[in-house]
Image (cartoon, rainbow, N blue to C red):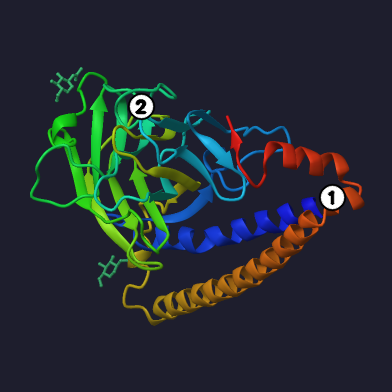
């Protein structure tokens, strides 16, 4: 039963990614070239239940105050003072071009005093705790700060998302919330929303970095910032860290999904396929309606799988409540689950 539940869950997650992948394809263009294909990277993705049978994750490390609730989230900080937690990929991200989408949640009781926020990293070093949203200063690579607490006065509102490209010796401008070395930013009220909050970054080597944020309505991605001609370090580690000081919030990571992006070849850009010839124009139309059909098919499939997963989950919960594991010969596993708190969260 447990195995079946997780199989269904994995399937559901696998299908859930499809629309995201399509969206990533749709809105990314590099001159004549487009992102033609996106291949999901298992090494840089993480979903519930986050850990395997050995209570580890093969591809990710957790640390500091971070703990896992296998049903819900990786909580980097609790809504308490002086907390610090992190989640880092074990392997560097070796793709030339990539898309990373992070679903996160920032919540807390207070409506006027809260902070400090979290950071998404693509840097040459990993898992070193420090003062910049829970990670080291003078980092080399990209930091994107999801900052909920303003240290300085600004003409723009908070929460704010700010990007910085560190060269290994430049310090984060803490007193002005990263303004001195900001490469781009936007204000976005991603705290305590009713909508799922996600950050998506797309990087095409030496061409551009694009950051979008999802927080206003379902499937409504807002442009945050875009930097042309940017070069990130090769093979950076992917990390997320969070920090609370005197003020606090719960900072959670729900999931991370990464894709390696394959560009269309320069010699035959897609957009120029239909060059006045009826034949090629028809082919173009056919192609696009085909992909729309495919999209709807996948959406339907996804809805079906979701329903299945939900039913499976319901059965799982009911059995679990009745002590179903024992009666099904899963006694050991049931006990293990209880002891490690599949429902209450496991501390690392
Ligand atoms: C790093 O950036 C800082 C600030 O822009 C600059 O002063 C410093 O010279 C740079 N260091 C290197 C090694 O490029
Ligand atoms: C498209 O048409 C123009 C002139 O109509 C021609 O010069 C060009 O070579 C054509 N491109 C392709 C890819 O067929």
Taking the image as shown, residue 329 lies to the left or right of residue 27, namely: right
Q: Residue at x 35, y 44 (%)?
A: 203
Is 136 situated above or below 31? above
Nearer the observer: mark 2 or 1; the answer is 1
Tell me if I can see residue 259 in this picture.
no
Taking the image as shown, residue 343 lies to the left or right of residue 3, namely: left
| Residue bearing the label numbered 1 | 325
Q: Residue at x 83, y 52 (%)?
A: 323
Between the C-alphas of marks 2 and 1, the distance is 41 Å
Taking the image as shown, residue 102 lies to the left or right of residue 330, namely: left
**Residue 322 position in % (x across, y down):** 82, 57
Q: Which corner quadrant of the figure contains ligand 1?
A: top left
**Label 2: few (<14), some (14–19) or many (≥20) C-alpha neighbours in 10 Å:** many
Is 175 situated above or below 17? above
Residue 135 is marked as 2
Query: Which type of secondary structure does the marked residue at label 2 adopt?
Result: loop
**Residue 100 position in % (x across, y down):** 43, 46
Lower sequence index among marks 2 and 1: 2
**Residue 123 position in % (x across, y down):** 36, 28
Tell me if I can see residue 90 in this picture.
yes
């Amino acid at each position: 039963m447990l195995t079946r539940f997780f199989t269904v869950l994995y399937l559901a997650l696998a299908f859930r990614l499809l629309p995201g992948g399509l969206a990533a394809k749709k809105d990314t263009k590099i001159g004549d070239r487009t992102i033609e294909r996106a291949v999901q990277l298992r090494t840089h993705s993480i979903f519930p239940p986050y850990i395997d049978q050995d209570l580890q994750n093969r591809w990710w490390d957790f640390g500091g105050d971070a703990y896992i609730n296998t049903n819900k989230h990786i909580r980097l900080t609790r809504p308490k003072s002086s907390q610090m937690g992190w989640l880092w990929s074990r392997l560097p991200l070796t793709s030339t071009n990539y898309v990373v989408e992070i679903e996160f949640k920032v919540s807390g009781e207070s409506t006027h005093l809260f902070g400090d926020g979290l950071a998404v990293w693509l840097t040459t070093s990993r898992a070193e705790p420090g003062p910049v949203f829970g990670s080291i200063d003078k980092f080399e690579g990209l930091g994107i700060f999801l900052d909920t607490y303003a240290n300085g006065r600004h003409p723009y509102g908070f929460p704010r998302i700010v990007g910085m490209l560190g060269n290994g010796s430049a310090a984060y401008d803490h007193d002005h919330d990263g303004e001195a070395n900001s490469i781009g930013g936007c204000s976005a009220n991603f705290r305590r929303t009713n909508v799922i909050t996600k950050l998506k970054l797309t990087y095409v080597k030496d061409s551009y970095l694009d950051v979008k944020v999802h927080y206003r309505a379902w499937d409504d991605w807002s442009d945050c910032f875009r930097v042309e001609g940017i070069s990130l370090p090769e093979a950076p580690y992917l990390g997320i860290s969070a920090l609370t000081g005197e003020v606090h919030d719960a900072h959670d990571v729900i999931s991370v999904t990464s894709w390696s992006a394959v560009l269309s070849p320069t010699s035959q850009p897609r957009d120029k396929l239909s060059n006045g010839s009826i034949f090629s124009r028809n082919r173009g139309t056919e192609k696009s309606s085909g992909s729309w059909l495919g999209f709807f098919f996948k959406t339907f499939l996804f809805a079906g799988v979701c329903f299945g997963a939900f039913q499976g989950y319901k059965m799982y919960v009911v059995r679990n409540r009745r002590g179903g594991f024992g009666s099904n010969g899963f006694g050991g596993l049931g006990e293990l689950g209880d002891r490690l708190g599949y429902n209450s969260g496991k501390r690392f």
